[in-house]
Image (tube, grey):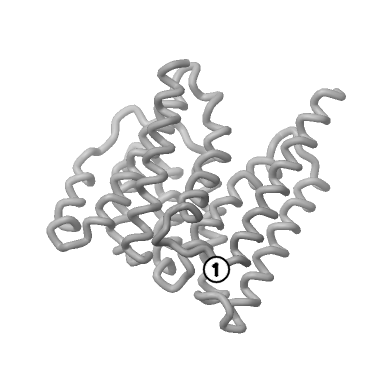
Amino acid sequence: MLYAALLVVVSIVLTVVGVSALGQSQGELPALALAIPALWLLPQGGVSAWLLLIGLGAYGFVLPEQSLALSISIFMMLPIFAVSFSTKSTWQMAALLISVVLAMDVGLMALQGEGKLPGSPGATIVQIMAVGVIWVALRSWRPVDGNTWWPLFLVVPLWVGGMEHAALVALCVTGLIATIQELLKGKLNEMVPRMVWILPAVGFATMVLVPWLEVPNPVLVAWLLVLGGALLGEYLLEDMEEEV
């Protein structure tokens, strides 16, 4: 358990550092920065690694067009997916939770369409779909026995090219994947479902607390409502399990 706790702490630190570096870069990430973590897993990662590559690539492609706070907040959909598609969930609960998320997203996209929130509705839709693909990749994930380490050397041209923050983001994302893989091994895998909750929450909390990053009020309210919906869904699942 001590080792698992250490891995959780490391993953939280990597999330904080990665989001802070992303904020310093103003969301300007080259495709290489998000490709490095997925390339690190290929070819041993199989279909899941390819899905992760597609999801990260699509997410990063529209990142410069978006409000960074909105981009980070979209990852809060991961707990919604975890509850909605749990084996203990019902279709009614899944429909309710997804309806709450869609309502929040439609409201934010309406503000974008009116020019009251940075970004575009199209970019938001792309990121929502990208997070969905990332969720599928995570759900079907199997630990990789041997990783291809050469892609990590690709951070060197990023660093030399004056994109230190992009290099740091790539290293943090790769480190997160490595820690989650360690948690998946042996008796540590029961911690992984908790990480789906912890890391998106920590990432957005970093956005709120770091002084040089701005979180628009509509994004904060939408994130809180989505978090509340996910927590309510989790509570209902536990309540139904106790009744059974």
x and y, in percent, of residue 84 in the image: 71, 44
Give residue 225's quadrant in the image.
Answer: bottom right
At 75% from the left and 42% from the top, the residue drawn is 232
Indicate the quadrant containing the C terminus: top left, top right, bottom left or bottom right.
top right
At 69% from the left and 41% from the top, the residue drawn is 83
The answer to whether residue 136 is visible is: no
Q: Which of 161 and 125 is in front in this view?
A: 161
The answer to whether residue 63 is visible is: yes
Most extreme residue toward the right, as rendered? 243
Q: Nearer the viewer, residue 215 or 64?
A: 215
x and y, in percent, of residue 240 in the image: 83, 30
- Label 1 crowd bin: few (<14), some (14–19), many (20+), radius 10 Å: many
x and y, in percent, of residue 152 in the image: 22, 44
At 54% from the left and 39% from the top, the residue drawn is 198
Classify residue 150 as left or right of residue 141. Answer: left
Disc 1 target residue? 124
Q: Which of 156 and 73 is in front in this view?
A: 73
> Disc 1 marks which amino acid?
Thr
At 63% from the left and 77% from the top, the residue drawn is 111
Most extreme residue toward the front, as rendered? 211
Most extreme residue toward the left, as rendered? 160
Q: Is residue 111 above or below residue 13?
A: below
Q: Nearer the viewer, residue 204 or 81?
A: 204
